Image (tube, helix red, strand yellow):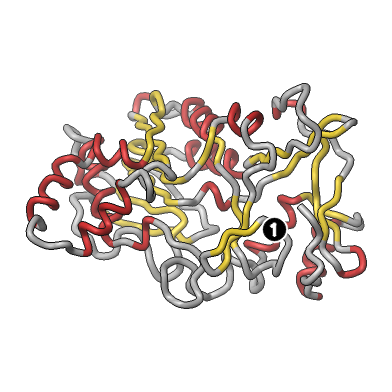
Amino acid sequence: MQPSPLHRVPPAFRAALERRAGGRAAVSFADFMAVALYEPAMGYYRRPKPRVGTAAGTDFYTAASSPLFGRLIIAACSHLLAGLSLGEYALVEVGAEPGGGIFGDSPHPFASLRTVGFGEEPALEGPTILVSNELFDAQPFRRFRFGPAGWRELGVSWAGEQLQEVELGEAPPADLALPANCETGYVVDAPLAARALASRLAAAPWTGLFLAFDYGKTWEQLTHDQPAGTARAYRHHQQSNDLLADPGEQDLTCHVCWDWIQAELSRAGFSAPVLESQEAFWVHHCSDFIRELTAREASRLSRDKLSLLQLLHPAHMGQKFQVLWALRAKKDLA
């Protein structure tokens, strides 16, 4: 990644970076991202602006933009918890957009529905269905690059009021298990904060269903098949590799490491976490709902049918996104 010659660092943003730096001349990319996304008043996810959808001024489109998405999730949860008392479960969405959520006013058979905003973490206990959509890919990540001296962490400096990527000179944590040898310049974007978030959510005293919609890869894929890393920026529905441009004005993201989240769930007593493509998940767990919808709308091309096509078709969201789900019974609560 090259410096952003057209984008100087705003004074308030620079001051926030300097507070995090504690006298150093640079911060880790995770620290830069924490300011760019979550700093009060200036972070991308702290600003009161529409981000999701197709209207003017939005930056990206997600499955949650369709009202059908929430109804499909309710049907899938009912299927996955079949045989249990659905009326005992709280349905909790984590990472909801301001003023909205996945479920809207969709009818459901559960005891309650609660939405927890982006950047907040819920208090969880008792029978629960925990649902997230593109939550883990938006957590701060650390960047590492392989060179003559081995793996070194990358960070961000602001010398001369110009943001630029720098090598921090620090080796990665010993337990990160990066390859001993790699092609020079290979970059790994390590979503360590996403793993920590999964650990905290799984550690709470609740039982039931964990359900995460996101995009990610295995650690093997991240360390062998992605030489430029998976980090990218989104603004006005355009993808960019200029991660330092206009901090606070664009979304920053990288692929989730599914291995790590599965391991955290297993460690907390969830039984055999299952990872499926979004297409396969809908087919396996919503087939009755899909059949009824298509039969009801057979004579017309309705909004629901168009939404279903986007959510299912492998050329749209069906293969781009994956679903990780796991169950924890009361007897398995760590």
The image quadrant that residue 18 belongs to is bottom right
Between 224 and 322, which is closer to the camera in this rendering? Answer: 224
Residue 292, position as x, y percentages in the image: 10, 48
In the depicted structure, whether residue 186 falls above or below residue 308: above
In the depicted structure, whether residue 207 falls above or below residue 309: above
Helix, strand or loop status at disc 1: loop
Residue 105, position as x, y percentages in the image: 24, 65
The image quadrant that residue 32 belongs to is bottom right
Identify which residue is drawn at 47% across, 26% down: 266
Badge 1, how many Cα within 10 Å: few under 14, some, many 20+? many
Residue 13, position as x, y percentages in the image: 76, 70
Q: How many marks?
A: 1
Identify which residue is drawn at 56% across, 32% down: 260
Amino acid type, mark 1 = Leu
Question: Horizontally, is 13 left or right of 103 in the view?
Answer: right
The residue carrying mark 1 is 243
Q: Residue furthest front?
A: 315
The image quadrant that residue 86 belongs to is top left
Question: Horizontally, is 203 left or right of 11 in the view?
Answer: left
Question: Horizontally, is 329 left or right of 251 in the view?
Answer: left
Between 203 and 163, which is closer to the camera in this rendering? Answer: 163
Residue 101, position as x, y percentages in the image: 37, 62
Identify which residue is drawn at 38% across, 37% down: 277
Identify which residue is drawn at 44% across, 26% down: 269
Q: Residue furthest bottom?
A: 56
